[in-house]
Amino acid sequence: MALEKTAVIGLGYVGIPLSALLASRGYDVVGIDLLEDRVTQINRGELPLKGDEPGLSDMLSRAVKRGRLRATTRYDSCRDRTVIFICVDTPIDANKRPDYSRLEEALAGIGKNMKRETMVVVESTLAPGTMLGIVARRLEQASGFRLGRDFQLAHCPERVMPGRLLHSITTYDRVIGALDKQTALRAKVIYSRLTKGKLHMTDLTTAEIVKTAENAYRDVQIAFANEVALISEKLGADAYEVRRLVNTCPLRDMHIPGAGVGGHCLPRDPWLLVQSGKASSPRLIPTARAVNDSMPFHVVDLAVDALSAAGRSVEDSVIAVMGASSLQDSGDSRNSPSIPVIESLKCAEGLRVHDPYLDKIAGVSTLKDAKKALAGADLAVFMVSHKAYRRFTPATLKKLMRTPIVVDGRNLFDTEKMRRAGMIYRGVGKKAI
């Protein structure tokens, strides 16, 4: 049986690993993206994504060299495709409502160029109700075809994590929503070649709810951990020790507190679920979002308090923000908790930002040498647990810095060791020293 000819719309953190994996499994793949520089890089066999992504660069390079993957900016490349995957970004606007401008543009481009019997699979995360309310309708309008008669539609929302994109896409279970059994089985054939995980069949709307609910669930769990961390700080306890002991109780899984929740999914997906369910007046999910959004500003409060303990202020201090990406060892800066921290500390005498993977964030160019960022600083604010920071000991920090003040947003350092080294130390969920 001949393999489907495939197209992947949107070559980002979802579309690139999907394209490379499809090609590695023998599919002919056309990747479509509106960014010409990205298309050029991919056609050279180069991975445009920054950060540590084990195996992906080599897989992409091999796919291009073997002629199984090519990239373009033109939607007319869809005309001979039998399966089209949509992996475009679906952000939220200032009012926490989904912005489907990129999705609608993709649907228009696909609809004008797809042929009969094409199956369109949406991997983008959507507010529940969007597949039938927007996607199906726009494809019918642009193509003149009828869903179910002339083309098929499925929703298999992505489950990828920057830093382990290939691992995610090849091992995680997937949920496939479809309008009918025939479409579900057709999609299942493809995804069974991509992942070792189980494939779970359902309807379109349920698949949408599952994706947004799974990320809202995690966001709520993190918010709980952050609230426990704030309580622990006030009581002079260590929230990480609290967490360890809580999790010795069966059926408990307290998450890790920290300096904030970033990335594309967790700050956005809960709002997609809330917007679709606003008739039920959701309360818990918006509250959890508020807690997690407040954590970077709590880090700033810790910084001000620590400087004050040394008789300093933000304005007369040299401050190093260590880590700018939204996730450890990733180049993804979307919704990074470091952004509000950097913006709040721009009034410092000197502000330095270090990150191994980003060149610029919040209008500030980053340093690539961590020691240079720390040298002569009065305060180091650790916002990301990059592997590069694990080599710093309290003694090393004290030797490098002008004033030995550290704010730890990711539990990188041991409180007692910092105390013995003579550091002024504040940490999320930790006793102040």
Image (cartoon, grey):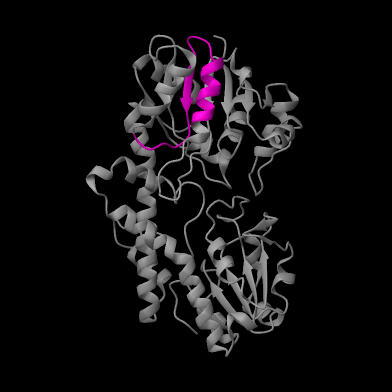
Q: Would you place residue 3 above or below residue 246 in this image?
A: above
Q: Would you place residue 276 above or below residue 404 in this image?
A: above
Magenta-colored stretch includes residue 107? yes
Q: Position of residue 95 (x, y in %)?
A: 40, 49
Q: Would you place residue 370 above or below residue 204 in this image?
A: below
Residue shown at 38% from the left, 38% from the top: 127
Left or right: where does residue 104 sit relative to residue 70? left
| Magenta highlight range | 104-128
Residue shown at 35% from the left, 38% from the top: 210
Q: Position of residue 94 (x, y in %)?
A: 45, 50
Q: Would you say residue 192 is visible in this rendering?
A: no
Q: Would you say residue 2 is visible in this rendering?
A: yes
Magenta-colored stretch includes residue 335? no
Res 221 → quadrant:
bottom left
Q: Would you place residue 160 above or below residue 181 in this image?
A: below
Q: Position of residue 190 (x, y in %)?
A: 50, 21
Q: Position of residue 389 (x, y in %)?
A: 64, 66
- The residue most toward the left is 280
The residue closer to the viewer here, 31 or 67, is 31
Task: Give the position of the N terminus as an image quadrant.
Answer: top right
The residue closer to the viewer here, 114 or 175, is 114
Residue shown at 52% from the left, 80% from the top: 304
